[in-house]
Image: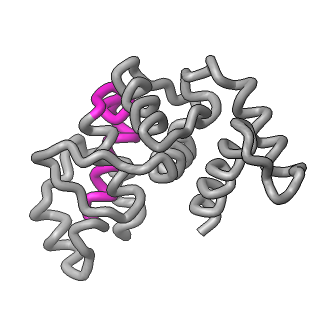
Amino acid sequence: MDLENIHNIDEEVVEPGTLTHLFPEATSLERQLVYVKKIIKDTRAIHEDMDVFENAVLIINGIEPDVFKMEGCEVKHIWKAIEFIKSMQPEVSFSHEVLMYIKAISSAEGIYFYPPAIGLDENTDLLTAVQKRAIQGPFPLVDDYVGIQASKFLKIEQYLGE
């Protein structure tokens, strides 16, 4: 068994010492990613608890979290994590607490569209308009509301493509 697929084992708990013993070359972040995958596969904790969600978002993006404090993350990190989570659980739904966290982080960055199909459907028209403007222009993007949102969308898309 390799580190990439160890989350698929049937054991309920994978002990940290076991991972360290089996994969001594793995970094702390790589081991934490195994736990995130296991949580996504076996529980709804990431979907229900804002703190678990935030730490998972950071780990999925290669950022070592400090689990003893709320650090926040960036919208681009949330989009990448949602893609990752949906690749493992396509029919994902998030709790009100997690959705409000996503809205708060987005609002703090001046972003008012959200990842599609997560339960924040009130701004689907805005997301559609932003995506259309980001693809079709006019370029350079006009400094109006949709143009500004489109430029932020393109930055997210660039990060996701890296």
Count the marks.
0
Picture residue at 60% right of the left edge, 54% below the top: 156
Tell which residue pokes out farthest to the bottom in this image: 25
Residue 104 vertical position relative to residue 62 in the rendered view, above or below: above
Magenta stretch prevailing secondary structure: helix
Picture residue at 24% right of the left edge, 48% below the top: 71
Q: Which residues are magenta?
A: 31-50
36 within the magenta span: yes
Which image quarter holds the C terminus?
A: bottom right
Question: In the image, 26: left or right of 116?
Answer: left
Tell which residue pokes out farthest to the front in this image: 143
Q: List x then y, in percent, for residue 69.
A: 14, 45
Q: Nearer the viewer, residue 137 or 41?
A: 137
Question: In the image, 7: left or right of 159?
Answer: left
64 within the magenta span: no
Q: List x then y, in percent, for residue 108.
A: 42, 39
Q: List x then y, in percent, for residue 157.
A: 65, 56
Question: In the image, 23: left or right of 116?
Answer: left
Q: Nearer the viewer, residue 95 or 130?
A: 130
Question: In the image, 1: left or right of 77?
Answer: left
Q: Nearer the viewer, residue 142 or 75?
A: 142
Q: Would you say residue 7 is visible in this rendering?
A: yes
Picture residue at 33% right of the left edge, 51% below the top: 9
Q: List x then y, in percent, for residue 8.
A: 39, 51
Colouring of the image: one colour
Residue 60 vertical position relative to residue 98 in the rendered view, above or below: below
